[in-house]
Image (spheres, rainbow, N blue to C red):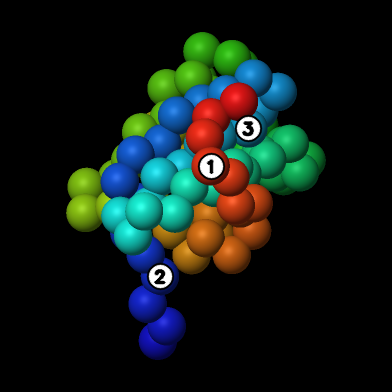
Amino acid sequence: MEQYPKIKNVKALKNKRIFISFRNGVNKLYDCNPLLNDEAFQPLLDDQTFNNVKTDLGGHGISWNEEVDLSESELWINGQHTEQKD
């Protein structure tokens, strides 16, 4: 099983994007808009819910609540490299 960098921090941004800082020093932007077509991610349409994103214990992923989360591998593979928050 491939190892992916663990997440240090996550921050919700405008337009349903998130900024992720990985423990290896890499920063990425991840666009959550494509997820919103999936019924499981419909709660993220609510701005208050979306803005409550947090890093999971151990840095293995992020979550918004008990039902909505993403793994570090998804964020690492599909996130876009960036230097800073925009």
Image coordinates for residue 86, horizontal then vertical, percent: 60, 25
Question: Tag 3's secondary structure?
Answer: strand
Q: Which residue is mark 2?
A: 4
Disc on the earlier residue, 1 or 2? 2
Q: Which residue is mark 1?
A: 83
Farthest residue in the left direction? 58
Which quadrant is home to the N terminus? bottom left
Q: Residue at x 53, y 29 (%)?
A: 85
Image: 23 above or below 47: below
- Name the amino acid type tagged 2: Tyr
- Residue sitting at 48 percent across and 47 percent down? 27
Q: Which residue is mark 3?
A: 17
State the residue in front, 67 or 62.
62
Q: Is residue 36 above or below residue 71?
A: above
- Secondary structure beneath label 2: loop
Spatial CA distance of label 3 from label 1 is: 15 Å
